[in-house]
Image: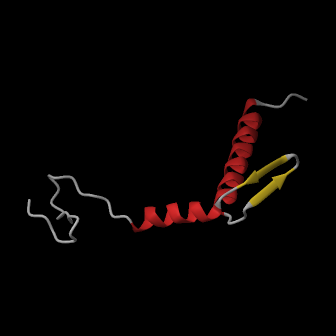
């Protein structure tokens, strides 16, 4: 019995989604070491947490022609 192209496309898509979800779960975990079979990954979770916190707390700078007022280094609004 020969398997159809539709089966293989669904199989590859499902396996790709499964692998991507595993990678996503591994990134979100706070484990310092992960070991699967013969692969061991050691992460610096404290540095990753600091980087994520900086990304969350930083405000994007509006372009000069934007109607949104920009905040300067002193914390006051710049006049455009």
Query: Could you tell me which quadrant the N terminus lies in?
Result: top right
Question: Can you tell which quarter of the image residue 77 is in?
Answer: bottom left
Q: Is residue 70 above or below residue 15?
A: below
Q: Is residue 16 above or below residue 30?
A: above
Residue visible at 13% across and 64% down? 78
Colour mode? Answer: secondary structure
Report the label total: 0
Camera-side residue of 2 and 52: 52
Residue visible at 22% across and 71% down? 75
| 43 left or right, relative to 78 | right
Q: Which residue lies most toward the bottom here?
A: 76
Question: Can you tell which quarter of the image residue 76 is in?
Answer: bottom left
| 45 left or right, relative to 72 | right
Camera-side residue of 5 and 75: 75
Q: Which residue lies most toward the left here?
A: 80
Q: Which residue lies most toward the right here?
A: 1
Residue 59, image x, y percentages: 33, 64
Residue visible at 21% across and 52% down? 63
Residue 64, image x, y percentages: 16, 53
| 47 left or right, relative to 74 | right
Query: Could you tell me which quadrant the C terminus lies in?
Result: bottom left
Camera-side residue of 36 and 14: 36
Residue 60, image x, y percentages: 31, 59
Residue visible at 23% across and 65% down? 73
Q: Is residue 73 above or below residue 11?
A: below
Residue 13, image x, y percentages: 69, 41
């Amino acid at each position: 019995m020969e398997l159809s192209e539709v089966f293989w496309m669904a199989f590859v898509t499902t396996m790709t989604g499964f692998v991507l979800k595993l990678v996503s779960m591994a990134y979100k975990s706070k484990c310092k070491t992960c070991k699967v079979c013969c692969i061991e990954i050691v992460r610096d979770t404290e540095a990753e947490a600091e980087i994520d916190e900086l990304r969350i707390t930083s405000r994007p700078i509006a372009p000069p022609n934007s109607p949104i007022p920009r905040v300067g280094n002193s914390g006051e609004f710049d006049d455009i």
